[in-house]
Amino acid sequence: MSLNMPADTPQRHPAITGYAIRDNCLVIGDTPVTRLASQIGATPFYAHDRSRLDARIELLRHYLPDGVNLNYAVKANPMPAIVQHLSGLVDGFDVASAKEMQTALDTPMPAKRISFAGPGKTPQELDRAVAAGITIAMESETEMRTISAAADRQGLRPRVVIRVNPDFDLKSSGMRMGGGPKQFGVDAERVPQMLGHLAKLDLEFVGFHIFAGSQNLDVQSLCETQIKTADLALALAKHAPAPVRHLNMGGGLGIPYFPKDQPLDLEPIGANLAEVLTRIGSDLPEARVMIELGRFIVGEAGVYVARIIDRKESRGEVFLITDGGLHHQLAASGNFGQVIRRNYPVAIANRMNEAPQETANVVGCLCTPLDLLANKVELPRAEIGDLVVVFQSGAYGLSASPMEFLSHPRPAEILV
C-alpha cells in the first residue's frame, strides 16, 4: 500500500505503517477514516478491513503445510460480518458460547467443522450443541455425563473430543492456557481414565483438543510446544476407544502490540509443523490436524476510532479527552491482562503525515483514572474534532470490554 509520507516522517510502529494514507488521513479498506465517520454518523466506532483479513489468511496458507487445517477462534472477534467473511476462507470455527455457536451456524460452515470448547458449559448449551451436530470439546467428566444424557434424550450420537490440560505450558506466552492447575480441560494424567469411562457411553469419540497458551511472539517456544503437543496426543491416543480423527493443536501465534515487539516469522513455524505432521500422520493416519487462531487472523485488521471532544492541560501535561474509552477498548487501557501497562499503537487519524509536536495523554470519557487509551505518547498537535485511532484492535476489542459501564452508547462496528 502506498503511504504517501514525507521523507522526514519518523519511524512508526509496523501496525501503523501497514495502512495506506491519503491526503493526510488514514485509510481503512479504500475509505478515509474521516469519511467513515461521516458514513456511520457518530463516533466512536470500530472499523475492520476485509482486505487485511484476506491477506492474513493468504499469508498463513503460504507458510503452513498443506495438511494443517486452519480454524478461526470466534471468541477473538464474534462480529457476525467477520465470521461470515471468514467462513469462506478458513477450514473450521471454534466457539465458546451458545451465541457464538449460533453465529457460526448462521454461516455456510458445515456443523461438523464447528467445535465448542470452554469450561462451565450449561446443560442447556450442551443440549443445543448436541442438537446442532457440532463437535463438543469436553472439559470434565461432568460434561461428559451431561452430554451423554442429552444424547440419550435426543436419540443422537454426538461427536466429542477431550480438551486436555497438558503438563506443560507455552513459555513466553501472554496468556497461559495449560500446565499446572487450570479450569480448562482435563489434566493429561487423568485423560486415560476418562477415556475408559467414555468407551462405555454411546458418544462418538473423535479426538483431542490441546491448547497450551496464546499471544506468543517467540518462535522457539511455539515450535517446542507444537512438538510437545504432538507427543502428548500420540501418547493419549494409545488409550483411545476409537481412532483419532480430530486433533486441535491450539494456536498461540501472537501479534506485535508494543514498540519492542517484532512480527512473527512464520517460515520456521510452518517448517516445524510439517515435521510434526509427518510424525502424527504415521501413527494417526485418520487424524484431521488443525491449529486454532483468533487474534493472529483478526487482530491487525481492526482499528478503534474516537473523536477528541476536549483538550486540556493539567500541571504541565496535555490530555486529549475522547468520546471513547475503556468501556469499548478495555485491552488498550491496560486492564485486560497486562501486568505492566504499555501503549497500543495510536495516531491522529486525520494528521497522519504530520510530525510529532507534543507528548499527550489520550483518555476516554469515563469517571475513572483507569480510562487511559495512551499514556504520554508523541503525537502531532491535536485539536477538538480530530480523530484518534487505536491500532491492533481487531481482536478482543468490543466484545471483551465492559460496554455497560457508565451507560454510554454502544459504538458502531463495521467491516469495510
Image (cartoon, rainbow, N blue to C red):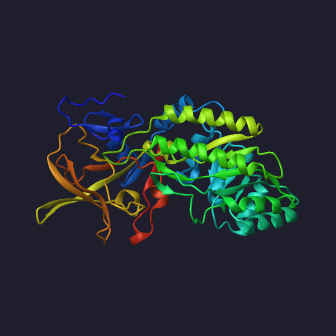
Left or right, residue 2 beside residue 399:
left
Residue 332 locus on image (x, y percent): 36, 56
Q: Is residue 38 at all visible to an observer of this figure?
A: yes
For the point 57% across and 33% down, which residue is it? 64
* Residue that lies at the very extreme toward the left in this rendered image: 316
In the image, taking residue 290 as reference, residue 216 lies left or right, namely left
Query: With respect to residue 270, does 364 lie above or below?
Result: below
Residue 416 in sight in this render: no
Q: Is residue 126 above or below residue 63?
A: below
Horizontal relation, residue 354 to residue 196: left or right: left
The residue at the point 46 percent across, 51 percent down is 413
Figure label count = 0
Residue 74, percent from left and from top: 58, 51
Residue at 21% from the left image edge and 54% from the top image edge = 384
Please state the horizontal and vertical placement of residue 52, each as a whole percent of the image: 46, 36
Image quarter where the N terminus lies is top left
Residue positioned 32% across, 43% down in the render: 34
- Residue 367's x, y, as percent? 31, 72
* Image-based side of 7 in relation to 209, left or right: left
- Quadrant location of residue 291? top right
